[in-house]
Image: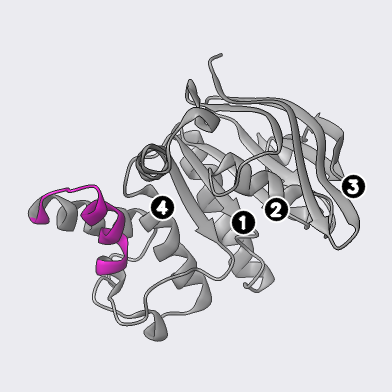
Amino acid sequence: MATLISAEALVKLYQMGDETVHALDGVSFTIPVGEYCAIVGPSGSGKSTLMNIIGGLDTPTSGKIVIDNNDIGEMSDEELALFRNRTIGFIFQSFNLLARLTAEQNVELPMIYAGVPVKERRERAAELLHRVGLGERLGHKPTQLSGGQQQRVAIARALAGKPALLLADEPTGALDTNTGKEIMNLFAALNREGTTVVIVTHDHEVAEATRRTIEMRDGHIVGDHRNGSRAA
């Protein structure tokens, strides 16, 4: 199976006063195309730093990260911005929707940046909102939607650019248990359709719903295993 993400000996150092903190300390792994994976660990484990590096939002102190056959460490800021918009769909715990825009307009945003014509982006936004179960909510603004509905809009927006990778940061953290399960079921369905999904979480129940768990602690990978039948 083709490799989508390859990380080699990633190190990330932060200077905290007189102390040097190893947020990542020689992290290496690969994620194949079509994987459904969780990166799990407690606060301070390095998982958020790793997510930011995978997403091209931060750079390692040393080491190499290759995504979709692109060494993102070799890209200029402009190249990296274009690559992120084309290749990675981001989903955040806080949804990050624009309150003044409708659900449909929020989903259109990445396509505006990508230069997609008006008619095409409106059709795709409507199609994606139908796909995540919000076909009757196109004209609703975030304040008119529940937390689970807002997260579905965020997922639709992340899919707008037809990304190779969906990268989700604590996507169920702001949701109640039942709504969180609905969102995880949606991720599983998207994965079955061929989308590579990587979820960063501290929640082991969320991790167990995926096919593979990479466990981090103190900047190191301390476990990497396949999950049980629930992730099948």
Identify the residue shown where x is 59% and y is 47%: 58
Q: Under tag 4, what secondary structure?
A: helix
Residue placed under numbered mark 4 in the picture = 158
Q: Is residue 127 visible?
A: no
Residue 90 spot, x, y in % from top left: 49, 52
Residue 169 disc label = 1
- Tell me the CA gap for discs 2 and 1: 8 Å
In this rendered view, identify the residue nearer to me: 159 or 184.
159
Q: Which residues are magenta?
A: 105-118
Residue placed under numbered mark 2 in the picture = 48
User: Which mark is in front, 2 or 1?
Assistant: 2
* Picture quadrant where residue 16 is located: bottom right
Residue placed under numbered mark 3 in the picture = 218
* Chain-order first, disc 1 or disc 3: 1
Taking 159 as reference, is 202 left or right?
right
CB atoms of marks 1 and 3 within 8 Å: no
Label 4 neighbour load within 10 Å: few <14, some 14-19, many 20+: many
